[in-house]
Amino acid sequence: MKKTLSIALLTIFLISSLSPLAYSETPSESSWTIMLYMMGGSKGDINDQINSTISQIEAAGYRNSVNIVLLEDGNRYGDSSALVMGRNGFYQANLSEINSSWGSEIDMSQWETLRDFASWAMENYPAEHTMLIFWGHGAGWKGMLADEGYRYLKISDIKKALSPIVEHQGKLDIIGFDQCNMAMFEVFGEISEISRYAIASENEEGISGWPYGRIISDIYRNPSSSPEKFSEKIVQDYGKYAAGYDRKTLSAINLSHMRDIYGALRDYSRVLDSLLPYYKFEITEARSEAQEYSGVSYNYDLYDL
């Protein structure tokens, strides 16, 4: 039986019916800013999904209570762009507004790119709550495949990029990983000082990723949703959307518990280390029989261990 690594694991089977929403007048003060950092990368296998994601969001309509801003880069040179959701759909923002040195091609694997985008988005589109979604290929604690030459945006670089912003504006409410294999202790531990909640999958995701039409429609309907409730709803939406996908896993994580988990894991590791000279075979066997994902030797479920 598959388990997902989670603190406050949220079940993902809620049956509901959502339909796209058209624009109507709402209060001018924004409740949420949702930022998407979309890394098509050099593999080129998911670049068509960039347009699909954008189309899903546009089909949900517009509400000025929710800001939606994205930075995206595909697998061709000169195809980088920044988009902002407006009444008539997404419109393009000048990349030079974000960083005066940027041209038509930016390197999404550089932590400075993430820093500049997030800083610009949060300054120009402020809201009560903020969410940052990383979109593309994930590789767990190694990072995220971000750009030409198979370079990675490292997990430590996320903290490096966002820490100065957090120091002035407080933690982000949610960091989401619409990527494979990102629900790891190492990932959550790294971002626990810059975000309150995280959403990620232990296993591989389907190539279509998250159901953005449903997710955006949900927050349009309930812009006053707390970060906890919004995180939960995203997991539920994904569970319904990916019902036919046999490897689906997604969890919403309360990152305030990471320090306690770290302490427990540290103590557990010390006990195992002391027993290793006497029970090496048994410990190795237990590890090999624990739930693993994607056939990767380092991607074991902590709970199952």
Image: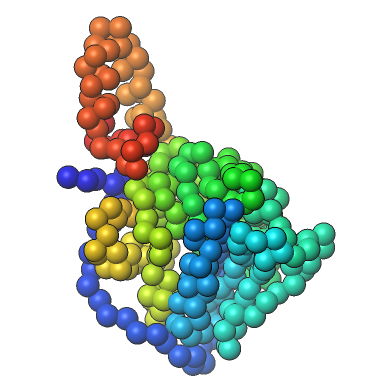
Q: Which residue is rendered at x = 26% and y = 27% of the image?
A: 288
Q: In this figure, what is the number of numbered marks?
A: 0
Q: Is residue 37 above or below residue 97?
A: above
Q: How is the image coloured?
A: rainbow
Q: Residue furthest bottom?
A: 24
- What residue is shown at x 27% (from left), y 80% (from top)? 17
How far across and how far down the image is residue 182, in percent? 43, 47
- Quarter of the N terminus within the rendering: top left
Q: Quadrant of residue 241?
A: bottom left
Taking the view exactly as shown, the residue that stands out farthest to the left is 1
- 83 sits left or right of 191 in the view: right
Give the side of residue 279 with respect to residue 211, left or right.
left
Q: Residue at x 64, y 54 (%)?
A: 108
Residue 152 vs residue 62, the one in the foreground: 152
Residue farthest top in this picture: 277
158 lies above or below 124: above
Q: Residue at x 23, y 68 (%)?
A: 14
Q: Give how far across and how far down residue 195 sits, in percent.
A: 51, 52
Name the quadrant of the C terminus: top left
Is residue 232 at least partly visible in the picture? Answer: no
- In the figure, 298 relative to 256: above or below? above
Q: Residue most toward the right? A: 101
Looking at the rendering, which quadrant does residue 106 occupy?
bottom right
- Residue 139 in the image: x percent, y percent? 47, 44
Q: Position of residue 263 (x, y in %)?
A: 39, 30
165 and 120: which is toward the camera: 120
Q: Is residue 221 visible?
A: yes
